[in-house]
Amino acid sequence: MENTSTDQDTKELSVHDCWKYLQSVSIGRVALINGEVPEIFPVNFVPNYGTVLFRTGPGTKLDVLREGAVIALEADGFNRYGTVAWSVILKGSPEFVTQPEDIQEAVEAGLSPWQPGAKDVLVRVTPSEISGRRFVIAPPSKWWPPLDPTASDVHDDETREVPPGTAG
């Protein structure tokens, strides 16, 4: 993961810290290349002995995985106070898990589908690369341009997008 920030409040995570953060969440996004088009899918997952497991069913994700695609999984979160955030990216090769003991291990680790429907394909991602960063969340006044309420080119009958956390 490239860190272009020069701010002292950003820290590259060690591999150990990346796994620690991955173990603290169960939702992430899987990125695949479908032909020449990037695809991103939300997944629930569990870390498992240096790999990540998720379930899937029929559809684009499974079709692309069957073609032998490389995969990236991204997960992120923040502390309970909303002041520090983190992001981890794991890149690797997926494999389909078919051995009954491995499937049972995934079930015992708490991996179960969240959506109805067939999600009976278990995928293990063995990382070739894992990286992450943790950073202090800047207050909105630092990243959202201030609005001048007296300078408006919006007519009374039009709507205007309002920044999050501000009154409209």
Image (tube, rainbow, N blue to C red):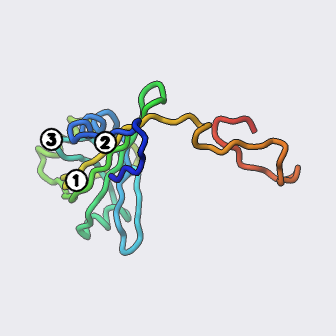
- Find residue 141 and report its image quarter: top right
Q: Could you tell me how far apart the alpha carbons at marks 1 and 3 are, in whole angstroms?
A: 15 Å
| Dot 2 crowding, Cα within 10 Å, few <14, some 14–19, many 20+ | some
Q: Which residue is mark 2?
A: 12
Residue at 66%, 45% (x, y): give it: 145
Residue at 64%, 35% (x, y): give it: 165
In contact (CB < 8 Å): disc 3 and disc 2: no
Q: Could you tell me how far apart the alpha carbons at marks 2 and 1 are, in whole angstroms?
A: 14 Å
Q: Earlier in the sequence, mark 1 or mark 3?
A: 3
Quadrant of the snapshot with the C terminus? top right
- Toward the bottom, the furthest residue is 35
Q: Observer-nearest residue: 42 or 164?
A: 164
The kind of secondary structure element at disc 1 is strand
| Location of residue 54 with respect to 39 vertically, above or below | above
The amino acid pointed to by label 1 is Glu
The amino acid pointed to by label 2 is Glu
Q: Which residue is mark 1?
A: 129
The kind of secondary structure element at disc 2 is strand
Q: Is 16 placed left or right of 58 in the picture?
A: left
Q: Earlier in the sequence, mark 3 or mark 2?
A: 2
Q: Which residue is mark 3?
A: 49
Q: Earlier in the sequence, mark 2 or mark 1?
A: 2
Q: Position of residue 26 (x, y in %)?
A: 34, 39
- Find residue 109 and report its image quarter: top left
Mark 3 or mark 2, whichever is nearer to me: 2
Mark 2 or mark 1, whichever is nearer to me: 2
Q: Is 168 placed left or right of 24 in the picture?
A: right
- Toward the right, the furthest residue is 156
In contact (CB < 8 Å): disc 2 and disc 1: no
Q: Position of residue 53 (x, y in %)?
A: 24, 47
